[in-house]
Image (tube, rainbow, N blue to C red):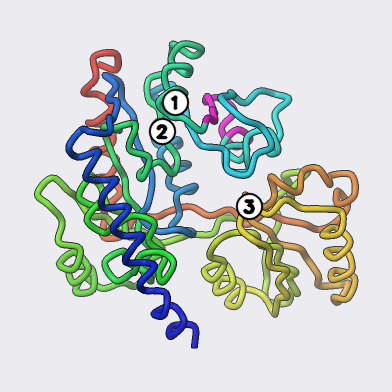
Amino acid sequence: MLRSFRYLLWPFSFLYGILIRGRNWLFDKQILSSASFNFPIICVGNLAVGGTGKTPMTEYLVTLLYGRYRVATLSRGYKRKTKGFAIADDKTTAIDIGDEPMQFHQKFPGITVAVGEERIVAIPQILHLRPETNVIILDDAFQHRHVKAGLNILLTDYKNLFTRDLMLPAGDLRDVPSSSRRAEIIVVTKCPSDMTEQEKNNIITEINPKPHQKIYFAEIVYDQPYHVFSQQPGQLHTEQQVLLLCGIANPKPLKDFLTKHVQGYDMIRYADHHIFTTDDLAEIKQQFEKMDASKRVIITTEKDAMRLQKFKQELADFPIYVLPIRHRFLFGGAESFHQQVFRFVEQFPTNN
């Protein structure tokens, strides 16, 4: 039924595709301008709406580069309550900069975390206020063509490759598949850990990369949970009953993981980037009280945890844990990916 309804929307997708192709043509012909910087800028993005793993890929890059270089991240700051350019400091909250930038700020206190709707304006501001910066990572900026990044990393979900998708609203694509040619790196994310060489080669053939492009494959790995407020480590086991709080675009991988590792779970599903309210807090407590007291635990995502911080006093004594995720490259691709990123950053005179 849902598939049939989506195909009814195809005429609107066709019109939307025409608009996006026209916009891209204007940039390609330099009628609309893109600014380049003599500075290492890495863009992480995708062609589709929804979760392809942009946040954990940004974190992967920060972890890879931090220690060698002074790193800055730049995000739009989706659903924040502020406007304009800002750099996170000790007083910053998720309301100020958005949940994903706040996550970067908490996990990597040694880096510069900036937000700004106009990246072409924000980049010079970062370099002015943080002149020691060696590399800037643009989070979710592939479709924002006013800035031309030197290294574009395009993510596509294994179960929803951009080659098989339709334009919005019939599908999930917000940009046309041909835009993938602008990427230097394409990462197929959320792959099964037992993916075969044959399947890998079939996907490479389907994507049909250009000579300048390299394709990698990665799976999602869930790390040890930790308490949202105390940061103390926790454990998941097969006797637990979980209340899952989830406000992300694609919770299916998380649900699949819990199905294999706990006795059972109930989920309270929220919209992506949902701002929690006192009504939500009451519902969480009510649902939690219905569960077996000896086995119950609350699990949420790192992004959701950033938006739950304002309820620290009310939830501090609850067994509420974050389940962090990260990318792990398959087929021995990590070393090649690392070297490609390092070569890009090191080609600039300030980083030699």
Above or below, 16 relative to 124: below
Q: Which disc, if any, is residue 273? A: 3
Magenta extent: 105-116
Task: Kindly report the distance in space between the C-alpha atoms of the residues bearing marks 1 and 2.
Answer: 8 Å
Q: Amino acid at mark 1?
A: Val
Residue at image location 24% in from the left, 40% down from the top: 26
Above or below, 111 relative to 260: above
Assess whether residue 134 is covered by the magenta stretch.
Answer: no
**Residue identifier under label 2:** 137
Above or below, 317 relative to 192: above
Q: Looking at the image, which is closer to me, 89 or 175?
A: 175
Q: Quadrant of residue 104?
A: top right
Label 1: which secondary element: strand
Q: Are marks 3 and 1 in contact (CB under 8 Å)?
A: no
Graded by Cα atoms within 10 Å as few (under 14), some (14 to 19) or many (20 or more), the crowding at tag 2 reads many
Q: Earlier in the sequence, mark 3 or mark 1?
A: 1
Q: Amino acid at mark 3?
A: His
Q: Is residue 253 left or right of residue 31?
A: right
Q: Amino acid at mark 2?
A: Ile
Q: Are marks 1 and 2 in contact (CB under 8 Å)?
A: yes
Residue at image location 52% in from the left, 26% down from the top: 111
**Residue identifier under label 1:** 71
Q: Earlier in the sequence, mark 3 or mark 2?
A: 2
